[in-house]
Amino acid sequence: MVDLETYFEEYGSGERRMYKAPTDVALDRRLEQFVRETAQNSADEGVGDDAPELCYRYERLEGNDLDDFLEAIDWEDTFRGHLEAVAEDDDEIGVQKMIDRVDDGELPLLLVEDSKTSGLTGDEFSEKTRYSTLVQDFGQSTKEADQGGVHGVGASVLWGFSGFKTAMFLTRPVEWDQIDVPRLVGRVDLPYHEYDGREWHGGGWVGRPDSSGRRAVSICGGGAKDLAADHFHIDEDQSRSDETGTTIAVVGFREPSVGRRSPGKVVDRISDLASRFYWPLLLESGLEVQVQSPSDSSPSEVDPRDRSDIAPFVEAYDEWKDAGDTLEAAPDIATVDIPIEIPAKGGEGDTTEAEVTLVVRTHDDSDDDIHRNHLALFRGARHVVKYRQYGHIARSVGQAFHGLLLAGKARYEFGVADGDVSDADRAVEDFFRVAEPKAHDTWEVETGKLQNNYPGGSDEIETLFGDTIPTALRQLLTEAGIGDEEMLENVGRQFPYFSGGPSGGPESEGGGGGSRTINNVRPEVNHVDGRYRGEGTLTLTDAPSEDWTLSVGIEVVDASHRPIEPVNVDDIGGRIPNSGTSLEKTERGVPELKVPAGEGTVEFELTSVPTDEIDAVGEGQARLTFTIEVGGET
């Protein structure tokens, strides 16, 4: 066997001590982010004419296989001691829990295996290569401007989901000689710690000793092939040498943001997330994804056409090019181009007058409601950045929908050559690429990168999503819905505290327009017997002079209060305080209450649908959302 070394870098006097590993601070550590980043990385690294192939495979090493793995990483003499030193001060990574699992005879691995991709090219101590940016360095990127991930920090999720802050890499890079493949190396990213009477930076490597003594380095060729198969058990059929690409083993896989759940549930959740955020790319054969749990005899394909929650979006995407610009009776599809002004890049030169495409499909009674009244936003990378909600528009005109916002190269055939894309659409593509934060999950958060490249860009995005899109949506849906257009035009004058619309306007001082619609709300929500149950009291700033409606929603949010997933409300009830008068529900088929004119305070209670199959429930906390409708305005 090739000599293996587990190497840790010793701390030098006067150097900075990093008590938190860099990979712990770059991105949030929800499973959604893990799937977004790893899928995008594989999609960006395709080579040849065939689509990149990606498989998420969950394995548990036990018995002799576990003993082999631990021996290979020098568990007893080196690795364990460093981990236990970190565990003494660890209240976040969960190192001790993973050590305990190993002592109980189990080590979970999540393998992220891609093929028909470039692999980790680059010399051992190179800079700005695929190898250095993924394994060696942090914060650099080798990706082109039109690819999905360009910040250079996405790989941090590999260590963020490892209870040992360790990932193993087995790769066959393109154009490498057959005798040099595969290539095997492990990377450790622990924080600063003290062990064995010395101080350690925390960064480490698993590989062969280097003659220069700088650190452990990659093992290549037949030795790597045998180690990966017989000792690490991450390529037991030794297929990695036959196909370009990379297998990544997240060692001691666990989800930092949720409690422990079964491998089957983890794999199901990965499949769901891959479909939810990459269905345009999967449909365009830009990526193929499979998943496999320990109980599966073989991988299963992720097919977005099998999912009811995104079926309306898929239908809209299939038919948008042939759709008209008006909506008939539901279900129907319409496509309109809406204007956007791209600021001069770098603040120099002229702005670019451009368009993005809005595709709207009216809601059918048989449609899944999870993403009802949402727009799926994406550009040429075909990665859904966000499902943006416009429920207030749908409710105001009485017509629900599902929709798409296609930006830049998303308006063209997948894989279109740059020369076939207009200058305006290339500008839009770059603008929204720059607008994405490191998590690639929105276009509406002002970032330093956007401000530096496109001064004033955040204002244009705010106008697009807060004014231009709502106006176009309202016009389309009013023609298809049951609303009274004249009533909608006059409602702002009848109810001035709605002026400025749901997103506010120049004179807005709070939610809903010129003054705050809701003065106070005291909500409480708990999870009991497999359902969310909420109650509370809501008070408006001014009691409307005509009947109004109240609907209460539930959404699961992460630690930063960003929505992960809505949870449907099954039933709602309410009453007027003091009098005890019960409130009736509306007849519109949604859980909302009718409130008499002149009443400004409501007590409510609600119950969600069963949450057993909603994995997001375990990923964050629930909060209530409130929608007030008066005279057709929301």
Image (cartoon, rainbow, N blue to C red):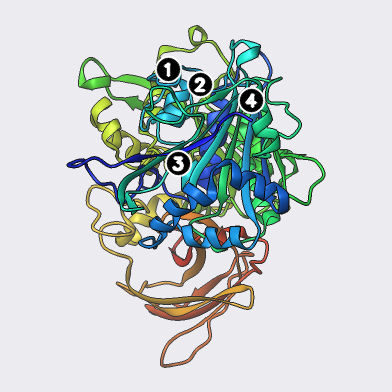
Using the numbered discs, state the Cα–Cα distance from disc 3 to disc 1 in whole angstroms. Answer: 39 Å
Amino acid type assigned to the residue bearing label 4 in the image? Gly
Disc 4 element: helix
Using the numbered discs, state the Cα–Cα distance from disc 1 to disc 4 in whole angstroms. Answer: 47 Å
Which residue matches tag 1?
426
* Residue 512 relative to residue 451: left or right: right
**Of labels 3 and 1, the one closer to you:** 3
Q: Which mark is residue 223?
A: 4
* Residue 504 relative to residue 398: left or right: left
Disc 2 element: helix
Q: Quadrant of the C terminus?
A: bottom left
Which residue matches tag 2?
409
Sequence-first disc among 1 and 4: 4
Amino acid type assigned to the residue bearing label 3 in the image? Val
**Of labels 3 and 4, the one closer to you:** 4
Vertical arrangement, residue 123 with respect to residue 582, above or below = above
Using the numbered discs, state the Cα–Cα distance from disc 1 to disc 2 in whole angstroms. Answer: 7 Å
Query: Residue 341: image x %, image y %?
Result: 33, 26
Q: Quadrant of the N terminus?
A: top right
Sequence-first disc among 2 and 4: 4
Query: Badge 2 local density, few (<14 within 10 Å), some, or many (20+)?
Result: many
In the rendered structure, are the residues bearing label 1 and label 4 in contact, judged by CB atoms less than 8 Å apart? no
Residue 251 appears in view: yes
